[in-house]
């Protein structure tokens, strides 16, 4: 058994919703095994208020969270990354910076809740759907015995986790 703690980066374009939720979820479900980070290819500079409300509804502390560029993780002195997950299709299609470390990568696309329109309730449900989908994947990932898997098996597992979807319409309740 290893005592290695793995650095994980979640990326979306604006680093204001999905990647922020994923960072918080990994901190909760991967505590002691993973250090979670998030970033954006074109960061918004602020976190979507619905993201903060969703996280707070599930008892996450949100102070200290910030929208930041993925370039921060390519600079000298940044943590060497073990895993990088894109959680939006746009970021998945972009050329990533040369991250420190040699991370395994996978695309875990999640529908962008910040594009939801309509009533406040409809928007709230969109954010909760994204939360539930990310939580399902992160629970699976954080339960893997990463150190026991060869690189090819691990890469295959990461891609398969990215296909996990929550049942249509199922939302988390706080």
Image: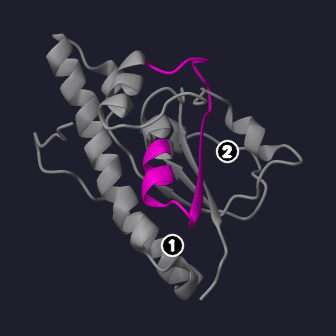
| Label 2 environment density (alpha carbons within 10 Å; few <14, some 14–19, many ≥20) | few
Q: Position of residue 47 (x, y in %)?
A: 50, 21
Q: Position of residue 69 (x, y in %)?
A: 68, 31
Q: In this rendering, is residue 26 above or below 67? A: below
- Left or right, 40 with respect to 72, comes to left
- Left or right, 119 with respect to 5, comes to left
- Left or right, 62 with respect to 78, comes to left
Q: Which residues are magenta?
A: 24-48
Of residues 169 and 108, the one nearer the viewer is 169
Quadrant position of residue 120: top left
Q: Secondary structure at mark 2?
A: loop
Of residues 92 and 23, the one nearer the viewer is 23
Q: Position of residue 98 (x, y in %)?
A: 77, 50
Q: Residue under label 2, please give it.
A: 96
44 within the magenta span: yes
C-alpha gap between disc 1 and disc 2: 18 Å
């Amino acid at each position: 058994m290893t005592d290695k703690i793995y650095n994980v980066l979640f990326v979306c374009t604006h680093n204001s919703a999905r990647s922020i939720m994923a960072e918080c979820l990994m901190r909760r479900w991967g505590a002691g095994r993973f250090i979670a980070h998030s970033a954006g290819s074109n960061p918004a500079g602020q976190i979507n208020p619905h993201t903060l409300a969703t996280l707070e509804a599930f008892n996450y502390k949100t102070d200290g969270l910030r929208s930041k560029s993925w370039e921060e993780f390519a600079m000298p002195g940044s943590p060497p990354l073990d895993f990088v997950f894109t959680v939006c299709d746009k970021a998945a299609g972009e050329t990533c910076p040369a991250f420190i470390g040699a991370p395994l990568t996978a695309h875990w696309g999640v529908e962008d809740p910040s594009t939801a329109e309509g009533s406040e309730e409809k928007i709230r449900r969109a954010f909760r759907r994204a939360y539930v989908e990310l939580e399902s994947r992160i629970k699976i990932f954080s339960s893997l015995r990463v150190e026991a898997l060869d690189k090819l098996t691990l890469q295959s597992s990461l891609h398969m986790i990215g296909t996990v979807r929550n049942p249509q319409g199922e939302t988390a309740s706080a």
